[in-house]
């Protein structure tokens, strides 16, 4: 058999040839072999050195036992073996050099004396030799501490160094944890330190039993990502105990302060702005870092409006109608009421007419089709106008959206585009140095469900803004108890509609947030409590102490060893396991939160007072009365007024009242002032109070925590109250003077204008028609031009309209209320009342 070689046979340079995708040496073969052998030798030497270090660590522990008489080995033999390893360390001569200041001179001389003594066949004093050996071992980094011989590998968040994102920290990032290493482990502490990847904003979930350090851990990591990796920290969910505002004060818990000291760090107060929805229930007096906010309709989208109505989705026609209503409202510079009116109008069943302009060419144009040359001016378009009529079906979703918007506007959350309280989420983003804390704990009980609506809006705005502008900082969403807003079983939620909508938002962030550089860091007590599509999209898991049931649940996914299961059940507070990139790292001592955490027995505002430098009265039984029984007066820090103390007559501060004593003022009076300048009754100058508070402050506080009264809200509330009383009287007078029937009282108001006009149009059609022509609702619809479905719905759902017309003698006729409805001057009433 013969074979023919084609001219098209592939060559080595042909892309279709397999050789074109094979690796090639960039250096000569000899150089490559030499480099590979050298690398292998170095790796072996380093591995041997680490093995020697592990042996020495074990020998030091054995020598300690031998010197105490608690070992089967002779202390002298163990010390001799340690000495052998130390003198053969390649670094020992440099360490003992007079130019190296790692060790003091006395220790160097003692070690050289001991070396000479052993070289002469003699034995140095055991205790003195052991002390010297330990100091040499520390200098050579065999051990780091004699009292605590435990070694650790640092756990850090990965340094970002990619286009558009660079960690601003210089050098290595600060550890957020440390993995304990056994004394006989031969790990390379530099190459085997643990880094947590977050280049693509991988989401993280912390799981633990109650009070085992979940919130402390996620808050610690959030602080690290903010300070050293350029994230904007959004603290999103509070369980009602005002724990999240504690980011503004330094941690004051003794165990966590000890933990931070082990990491070489101190508690830290973050500059925080606490956002509270400007609704009923918000206290008039709050710390100055609290900001009341509303959401302007110019920040809403059709999809957001649908979410506000508690709907998961809507069809395209509904979305277009909402978009049209929103566009018309914003273009006209109107507010929420106008938007609601438009939505209600579009929600009705209507017959609409649109004008279409068609362009038709004249008869000369036909010649061009036959290939004849025609004068260009002769080919002109002749515009013809035609009208297209179509029916717009009733849309309940639009009506629901209108009602939701009206309710939210009434509660103070949604406002017109020009409201001064409107949230500018872009500005919040750009203020990267401040933690943005959402706090919905002041809502009235009737508005409890509003918490989930506010959070949903908050998350949607963050996600959308970061999606629109990649120049903004990366967003970090801290969510404590993720199960509350993304539960695995929606039936367990108290407000199912609102939580379901919020769960959908969390799912979108979990699945799409990474690509928008929105990272979610959540906590939960049980993995299965969190919606499965959410938890499976959180690849970084931190497991602290767990119960048996939760260990079994996680074991189905991770196949823990018996030792791991035992450890997970017995971790001390602050210790845990990291599951990252398919590997389990344990045991890890996690760094505690540098900022404050919630305490069950101490009010959050009392802790603000102490951190700020004020004194606070926490009630009887707290020692305040005993400590201040001999004091005559105290000074309220907000008003500056001096108030007397009379324990016998129960003349004491109010619970939680921030105050100072005279001694606090006098200790901080500037030299240019005398005591007479600040004697009671006051008020004391503000600058003196601020000086005294600053002098009493134990730590740096980055936010202004002083108490302030929102006078605008207070005056608004007072004026509303007075206005309501006057309005009730005025409204009743106008209604009586204009003889408005009781069922029609609800027709007054701008938001009823469109619907009322259509109702009156229907009533006028009935009034003018011959009863013989109004046998059915179809007849009524034909007579008045309002769709039958709309009239039927008014009849069934609205008592006010049902009272206006009735079917009598097989024909539709107006009632007395209906006749009066046509006669009333509604526009006048709107001006007087609406």
Image (cartoon, helix red, strand yellow):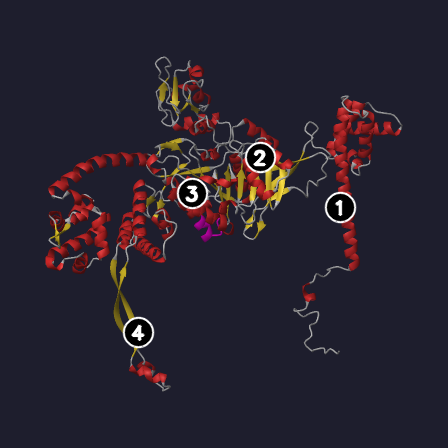
Callout in the foreground (4, 3): 3
User: In this rendering, would 101 be left or right of 353?
Assistant: right
Residue 359 disc label: 4
Comes first in the chain, label 1 or label 4:
1
| Span colored in magenta | 463-472
User: In this rendering, would 272 be left or right of 79?
Assistant: left
The residue indicated by pointer 1 is 43
Horizontal and vertical percent position of residue 436: 45, 40
Comes first in the chain, label 3 or label 1:
1
Membership of 37 in magenta stretch: no
The residue indicated by pointer 3 is 490
- Disc 2 versus disc 3: distance between alpha carbons? 34 Å
Q: Secondary structure at mark 2?
A: loop
The residue indicated by pointer 2 is 591
Q: Nearer the viewer, residue 9 or 176?
A: 9
Comes first in the chain, label 4 or label 3:
4
User: Mark 1 and 2 residues: CB-CB less than 8 Å, in contact?
Assistant: no
Callout in the foreground (2, 3): 3
Membership of 470 in magenta stretch: yes
Residue 372 disc label: none
- Disc 3 versus disc 1: distance between alpha carbons? 55 Å
């Amino acid at each position: 058999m013969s074979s023919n070689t084609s001219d098209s046979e592939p060559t080595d340079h042909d892309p279709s040839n397999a050789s074109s995708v094979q690796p090639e040496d960039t250096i000569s073969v000899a150089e490559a072999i030499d480099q590979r052998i050298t690398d292998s030798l170095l790796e072996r030497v380093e591995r041997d050195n680490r093995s020697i270090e592990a042996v020495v660590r074990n020998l030091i522990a054995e020598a300690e036992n031998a010197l105490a008489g608690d070992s089967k080995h002779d202390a002298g033999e163990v010390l001799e073996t340690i000495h052998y390893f130390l003198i053969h360390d390649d670094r020992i001569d440099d360490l003992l050099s007079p130019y190296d200041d790692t060790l003091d001179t006395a220790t160097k001389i003692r070690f050289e004396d001991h070396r000479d003594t052993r070289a002469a066949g003699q034995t140095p004093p055991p205790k003195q030799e052991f002390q010297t050996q330990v100091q040499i071992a520390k200098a050579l980094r065999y051990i780091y501490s004699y009292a605590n011989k435990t070694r650790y590998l640092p756990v850090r968040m990965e340094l970002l160094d990619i286009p558009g994102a660079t960690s601003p920290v210089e050098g290595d990032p600060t550890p957020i944890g440390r993995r304990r290493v056994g004394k006989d482990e031969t790990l390379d502490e530099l190459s085997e330190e643990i880094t947590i990847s977050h280049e693509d904003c991988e989401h993280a979930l912390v799981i633990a039993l109650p009070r085992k350090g979940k919130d402390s851990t996620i808050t610690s990591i959030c602080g690290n990502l903010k300070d050293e990796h350029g994230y904007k920290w959004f603290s999103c969910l509070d369980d009602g105990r005002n724990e999240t505002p504690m980011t503004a004060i330094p941690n004051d818990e003794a165990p966590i302060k000890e933990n931070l000291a082990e990491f070489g760090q101190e508690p830290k107060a973050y500059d925080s702005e606490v956002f509270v929805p400007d609704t009923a229930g918000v206290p008039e007096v709050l710390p100055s870092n609290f900001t009341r906010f509303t959401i302007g309709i110019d920040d809403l989208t059709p999809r957001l409006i649908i979410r506000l109505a508690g709907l998961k989705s809507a069809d395209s026609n509904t979305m277009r109608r909402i978009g049209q209503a929103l566009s018309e409202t914003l273009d006209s510079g109107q507010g929420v009421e106008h938007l609601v009116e438009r939505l209600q109008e579009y929600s009705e069943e209507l017959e609409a007419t649109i004008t279409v302009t068609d362009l038709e060419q004249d008869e000369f144009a036909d010649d061009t089709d036959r290939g004849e040359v025609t004068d260009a001016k002769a080919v002109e378009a002749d515009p013809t106008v035609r009208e297209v009529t179509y029916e717009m079906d009733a849309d309940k979703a639009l009506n629901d959206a209108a009602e939701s918007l009206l309710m939210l506007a009434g509660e103070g959350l949604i406002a017109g585009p020009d409201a001064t309280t409107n949230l500018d989420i872009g500005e919040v983003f750009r203020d990267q140095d401040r933690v943005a804390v959402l706090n919905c704990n002041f809502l009235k009980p009737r508005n409890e469900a509003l918490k989930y609506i506010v959070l949903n809006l908050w998350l949607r705005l963050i996600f959308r803004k970061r999606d629109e502008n990649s120049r903004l900082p990366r967003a970090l969403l801290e969510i404590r108890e993720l199960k509350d807003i993304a539960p695995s079983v929606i039936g367990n939620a108290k407000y199912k509609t609102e939580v379901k909508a919020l769960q959908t938002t969390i799912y979108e962030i979990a699945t799409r947030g990474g690509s928008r550089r929105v990272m979610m860091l959540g906590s939960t007590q049980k993995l299965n409590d969190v919606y499965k599509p959410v938890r499976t999209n959180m690849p970084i898991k931190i497991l602290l102490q767990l119960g048996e049931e939760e260990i079994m649940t996680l074991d189905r996914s991770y196949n823990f060893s018996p030792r791991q299961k035992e450890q997970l059940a017995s971790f001390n507070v602050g210790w845990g396991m990291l599951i990252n990139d398919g590997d389990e790292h344990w045991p890890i001592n996690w760094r505690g939160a540098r900022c404050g955490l919630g305490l069950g027995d101490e009010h959050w505002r009392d802790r603000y007072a102490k951190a700020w430098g004020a004194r606070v009265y926490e009630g009887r039984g707290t020692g305040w009365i005993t400590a201040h029984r001999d004091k005559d007066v105290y000074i309220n820090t907000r008003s500056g007024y001096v108030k007397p103390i009379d324990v016998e007559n129960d003349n004491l501060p109010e619970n939680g009242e921030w105050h100072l004593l005279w001694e606090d003022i006098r200790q901080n009076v500037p030299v240019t002032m005398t005591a007479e300048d600040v004697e009671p009754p006051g008020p004391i100058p503000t600058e003196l109070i601020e000086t005294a508070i600053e002098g009493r402050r134990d730590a740096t506080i980055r936010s202004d925590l002083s108490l302030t009264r929102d006078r605008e809200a207070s005056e608004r509330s007072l004026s509303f109250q007075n206005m309501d009383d006057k309005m009730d009287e005025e409204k009743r007078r106008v209604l009586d003077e204009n003889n408005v029937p009781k069922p029609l009282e609800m027709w007054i108001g701008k938001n009823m204008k469109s619907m009322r006009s259509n109702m009156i149009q229907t009533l006028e059609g009935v009034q003018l028609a011959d009863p013989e022509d109004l046998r059915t609702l179809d007849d009524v619809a034909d007579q008045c031009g309002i769709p039958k479905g709309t009239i039927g719905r008014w009849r069934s759902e609205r008592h006010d309209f049902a009272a206006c017309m009735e079917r009598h003698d097989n024909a539709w006729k107006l009632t007395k209320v209906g006749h009066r409805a046509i006669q009333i001057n509604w526009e006048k009433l709107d001006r007087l009342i609406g």
